[in-house]
Image: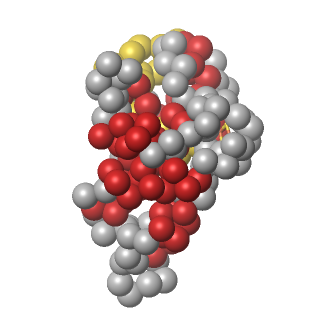
Amino acid sequence: MKTTLTVNGETHELDIDPRVTLLDALRHHLNLTGSKKGCDHGQCGACTVLVNGRRINSCLALAVMHDTDEITTVEGIGTPENLSPLQSAFVRHDGYQCGYCTPGQIVSARGMLSEFRQGWPSHVSDSLTEAPDFTDAEIRERMSGNLCRCSAYPGIVRAIRDAAP
Ligand code: FES
């Protein structure tokens, strides 16, 4: 099936099986291997990408569903030669150990910081009359979809706080 994926500002024409997930399309058809496959069941967050600025687990989405969307992967956030401020903060604060979950953590943190700048418009704050503060507890809650088997959570929280506006 023909589909068009716009990833990190570049448009790609693909002819793929409609059963291919967005994660597999990114990794195997576009060679963007930053997004990782951890559980393949929407439980670990290693495959997190942004679709039109919102975080999703790309292992749960079919590539053909995102024909007209803007997709951002970790490769679109920074490069080893030119780290983004968020990525630099992860390095400074030891926000990783083995590094496998780190791309998903970085993309999720990018999405979370943009939610914060927009006043936290998400399901977490739906029942609140005011947007919650940018506390460590709030960061943990907002990042709870991204697991780290090494438990680098304190460094991850410090990095996000450091990179926040
Ligand atoms: Fe997608 Fe774990 S690989 S959530």
In the image, is 33 to the left or to the right of 91?
Answer: right
Quadrant of the snapshot with the N terminus: top right
Q: Is residue 8 visible?
A: no
| Foreground residue among 84 and 92 | 92
Q: Position of residue 160 (x, y in %)?
A: 41, 53
Q: Position of residue 75 (x, y in %)?
A: 40, 25
In the image, is 118 to the left or to the right of 151?
Answer: left
In the image, is 70 to the left or to the right of 109?
Answer: left
| Foreground residue among 5 and 76 | 76
What residue do we see at 49% from left, 18% from top? Answer: 32
Q: Position of residue 162 (x, y in %)?
A: 34, 54
Q: Position of residue 27 (x, y in %)?
A: 57, 19
The total of numbered circles placed on residues is 0
What residue do we see at 66% from left, 45% from top? Answer: 148
Q: Is residue 117 visible?
A: yes
Quadrant for residue 117, please give it.
bottom left
In the image, is 143 to the left or to the right of 71?
Answer: right
Classify the position of ligand 1 by quadrant: top left, top right, bottom left or bottom right. top right
| Foreground residue among 83 and 3 | 83
What residue do we see at 59% from left, 32% from top? Answer: 99
Above or below for 132 versus 81: below
Quadrant of the snapshot with the C terminus: bottom left
Above or below for 153 versus 135: above
Above or below for 130 versus 25: below
